[in-house]
Amino acid sequence: MDAGFPTDDAALVEAIGTANLPTLAMVIVQLTGDPSLMRQGLRFKRASGQRMDGGLKESQASELRARALEVLRAYRDGGLRAPPPPSPELLHEMMMFSLGQPVPPEYVPMMLGDMERSGLLGERARPSAPRAPRPGFSALVIGAGASGILASIELSRMGIAHAVLEKNDELGGTWHENSYPGCRVDLPSHFYAMSFEPNASWSGYYAPRAEIHAYLKRVADKHGVLANVRFSTEVVRADYDASRALWRVVVRDASGESTLEANALISAVGQLNRPAVPALPGLDTFAGPAFHTARWRHDVELRGKRVGVIGTGASSMQIVPAIAPEVGELSIFQRSPQWAIKSPDYFREVSAGERWLLEHVPCYAAWFRFRTFYTAADLVHASLQLDPAWPHPERSLNAENERIREWLVEYIKSELGERTDLYPKCIPDYPPFAKRMLLDNGWFKTLTRENVELVTEDIARITERGVALANGQERELDVLVLATGFQATRFLWPMTIAGRDGKTLQDAWAGDPRAHLGITVPGFPNLFILYGPNTNLAHGGSIVFHSECQTRYITGCLKLMLDGGHRAIECTPAAYEASNAKLDAAQARMAWAQPSVRNWYRSEAGRIASTSPYRLVDYWAMTREPDPRDFVLST
């Protein structure tokens, strides 16, 4: 018997009392194999966030919990046998019932795959390894964040020798580098985990940075990743040797520069790894501490100080509410306002009972994850596309997008209360989701504090004493924080990557980064990019999910090459152009691609280069396995 499963009913009752009821209902159906629960008049309201009761009346909720107790008691007393997989037809019915709305059928195979990888349907399913990895074949992975950890795990599974090159002295990527006050994941924690390593121990529905970092280290340790990592080792350049079908990679560490060789090169440096420091005149003259959020100075005391924060994006929205109560004065310099959605779960803790359910009750974690997946990402996708007949494209895109806008405006006003002077400063003039939708963690309430000022006047220059504005005023400061984001469209920068004919990626892209499915580029054999062009998520969803899709695709490419006895695999120009034409057509309809919108998603050439226009289920299907017709395989 599972040592964590209680032998007394009282403990079961206590845990069931904390359950997400739509998720609990799916546990009942799957453990019993009896769908009658869904066909007897019980109905959940349309899913929204992590709402626990599903909109049921208390009498209905009590009946459901009582039934769950019967089922879990029988499951416990019967020896804890794993449930059989539901049929695709039943699974689809369960999806729609639990969410209280229609769900397209293409989610069924994805859900089944997630259950298999989590081990719910027996032994954890993983892609098959190559028939026989070629002796001497090796790979290099650049970066030991979430994507690099995933790549290392899969390469080890395939029996491919590899090293992971990490510029920092610790793994974790962005979760190592970003340690500013208030830093936490801004999408539901239970979806921000690898499908084959679910985490039932998140303390909150939006986990703080330290827990995310600890989770990644725990996964890396479990799968032996650390044995392959070379820390404090930065890649300077990589050159492809076509005659030998391998990459020569120049690295720099404490002892100087050296050259490594490998057959395959996988970049896992991501998009948000190099801070963007604005070219503000006089920045180097400021007398006090000045630092970027990704280089937070923990040695700088903020209590009672006059602090300035430049930027009002995702990092700023987390930092400002966290430091406002302790600083003396806080000046926030805003270029444009941001939409931020109400998030009652942002600081809510996961109860001990629900953590137990997630860890010990079959199906619970899988269904909770699917609910999170759908409501936090793909559910809103249709509302982000322009209706050509919509009369007000400057403010919204379609009827549902307008409804979201009206709801957001009313919410912002309710948070600002009597501070009507802040309304024009805080309500954006662009459609919802045209820039990244943020989560309100007390931002609007914080702006109403007496020691906080939201400054919308343009910055003229930085002075020794503070920030000089275009209107001639100056804000004197003790500390200056740059919440100015990252070099998001300078992919693989500052590395130099030279391909088959000596041409660099930067020259090939000419200011417009593109890749086939965000992963491969013609002219660069055996090079694979994780979190590459057009794979960021602007409509919600987990980048860990996307990285799993890409890692599965990359290992499929390696298997295709090795099983066929080939030395190199290279994306064809035709596949590259076709996939990008399809992508650009989809992109043109999205909120963030509208000509009037200015955001950080655009490349130097003006094209949306960082963000994906697809539903997550679409990208999952596209990357399920590589199509051999998309590649040239050479011996």
Image (cartoon, grey):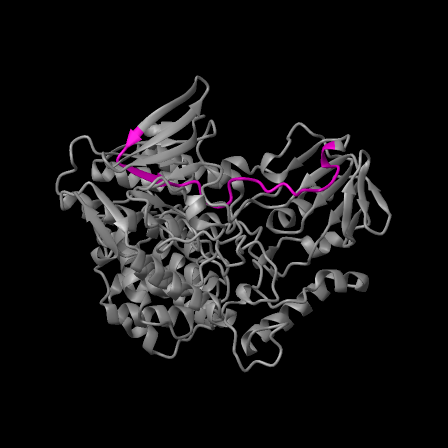
Residue positioned 41% across, 63% down in the render? 583
Check residue 276 for magenta coloring. yes
| Extreme-top residue of the structure | 255
Q: Residue 161, relative to residue 475: is it above or below?
A: above
Check residue 166 for magenta coloring. no
Q: Residue 558, relative to residue 97: is it above or below?
A: above
Residue positioned 70% across, 45% down in the render? 310
Q: Which residues are magenta?
A: 261-284
Classify the position of the N terminus by image quarter: top left
Q: Could you say where residue 496 lies in the image, as x and y percent from the top left?
A: 43, 37
Q: From where the camera sits, is residue 68 visible?
A: no
- For this view, does 338 lie left or right of residue 169? right
Q: Nearer the viewer, residue 391 or 383?
A: 391
Residue positioned 35% across, 36% down in the render? 141
Magenta part, dominant SS? loop
Q: From where the camera sits, is residue 51 visible?
A: yes
